[in-house]
């Protein structure tokens, strides 16, 4: 994401009456400090909360040490520029199992992520670093795996992607299942975690190997109204990022649906 397009994006979000935006550094962090300061000024002026998505080319469980170092560097760059932009959180895809047992992958991710968090602490960078719940069984990032990292490392949080979790499991697509995830997060991380959530939502196509591609909400079977009801009933606060292909349309649909829900529970 370049500075000019990011600033335009923030203004567009404000114009639409939406409250947050994720800066997509998915192809690389191509923004300098001066640009990031302009982004922060624009976001503050427009009242838009920001987060940042790290580059896709990350695998903290890579076989080659140089790939792990490069992955760590990409997360650090995202955190540094993200913090200057005023982002509260950064999000990243942590790793692939590459045939390893989940526990072995977890240990590798925890070690590398621990080194990143120590470096950010030394730099006085207070951004939250959030591994994303991933949509394929080949990817490290089951809910439990991310929650384990959150309990082990300071300032590591969860990016709860409900579409990915549904695609990965073929389940978790009803009010009671959405509620069970929120209860699990509260149980492991405390009630405060539900007051500062980072959530991704979109429609999704999936098969035996999990996620295939993102879809618009109305073209997919994701029960987004039930999800929004659960978020409202559990008084979840924080940021919801819409990752449907039609971005704006579904983001507005989610916001409007949420505001029109009756309060139950």
Image (spheres, grey):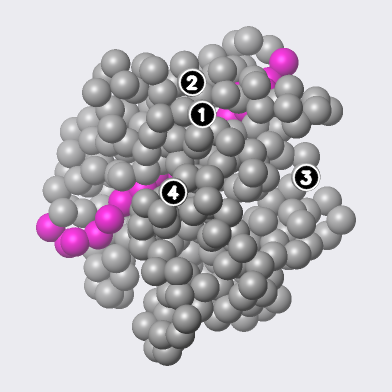
The residue tagged with tag 2: helix, strand or loop? helix
Please give the residue where the numbered disc 3 appears in the rendered image.
Answer: 137
Q: Earlier in the sequence, mark 1 or mark 2?
A: 2
**Mark 3 and mark 1: Cα distance apart in space:** 23 Å
Crowdedness near tag 3: few (<14), some (14–19) or many (≥20) residues, C-alpha within 10 Å: some
Residue placed at 44% from the left, 35% from the top? 156
Residue 256: give x, y in percent of width and height: 40, 83
Please give the residue where the numbered disc 4 appears in the rendered image.
Answer: 190
Residue 104: give x, y in percent of width and height: 73, 22
Please give the residue where the numbered disc 1 appears in the rendered image.
Answer: 152
Say left or right for 15 vs 157.
Answer: left
Task: Determine whether label 3 and label 1 are within 8 Å by CB.
Answer: no
Magenta stretch holds residue 185: no
Magenta stretch holds residue 47: yes
Q: Earlier in the sequence, mark 4 or mark 2?
A: 2
Q: Quadrant of residue 109?
A: top right
Q: Earlier in the sequence, mark 3 or mark 1?
A: 3
**Mark 4 and mark 2: Cα distance apart in space:** 21 Å
From what the image shows, is residue 84 above or below residue 191?
above
Say left or right for 212 vs 141.
Answer: right
Of the two numbered discs 4 and 1 in the rendering, the one whose residue sits closer to the viewer: 4
**Mark 4 and mark 3: Cα distance apart in space:** 27 Å
**Mark 1 and mark 2: Cα distance apart in space:** 9 Å
From what the image shows, is residue 83 above or below residue 191?
above
Please give the residue where the numbered disc 2 appears in the rendered image.
Answer: 114
The residue tagged with tag 4: helix, strand or loop? loop
Q: Which residues are magenta?
A: 45-63
Residue placed at 78% from the left, 62% from the top? 170
Q: Is residue 25 visible?
A: no
Residue placed at 46% from the left, 28% from the top? 153
């Amino acid at each position: 994401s370049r500075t000019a397009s990011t600033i335009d994006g923030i203004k567009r979000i404000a114009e639409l009456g939406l409250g947050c935006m994720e800066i997509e550094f998915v192809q690389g962090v191509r923004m300098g400090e001066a640009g990031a300061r302009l982004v922060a000024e624009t976001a503050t002026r427009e009242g838009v909360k920001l987060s940042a998505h790290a580059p896709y080319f990350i695998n903290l469980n890579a076989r080659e040490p140089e790939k792990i170092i490069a992955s760590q560097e990409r997360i650090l760059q995202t955190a540094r520029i993200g913090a200057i932009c005023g982002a509260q959180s950064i999000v990243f895809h942590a790793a692939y199992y590459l045939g390893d047992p989940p526990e072995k992958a977890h240990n590798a991710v925890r070690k590398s992520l621990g080194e990143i968090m120590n470096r950010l602490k030394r730099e006085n960078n207070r951004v939250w670093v959030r591994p994303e719940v991933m949509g394929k069984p080949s990817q490290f990032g089951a809910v439990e795996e991310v929650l384990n990292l959150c309990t082990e490392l300071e300032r590591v949080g969860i990016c709860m992607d409900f579409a990915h979790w549904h695609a990965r499991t073929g389940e978790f697509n009803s009010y009671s299942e959405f509620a069970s995830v929120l209860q699990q997060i509260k149980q492991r991380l405390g009630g405060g975690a539900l007051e500062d959530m980072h959530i991704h939502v979109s429609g999704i196509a999936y098969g035996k190997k999990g996620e295939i591609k993102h879809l618009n909400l109305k073209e997919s079977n994701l029960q987004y109204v039930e999800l929004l009801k659960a978020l409202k009933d559990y008084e979840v606060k924080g940021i919801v990022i819409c990752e449907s292909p039609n971005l704006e349309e579904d983001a507005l649909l989610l916001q409007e649906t949420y505001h029109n829900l009756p309060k139950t529970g």
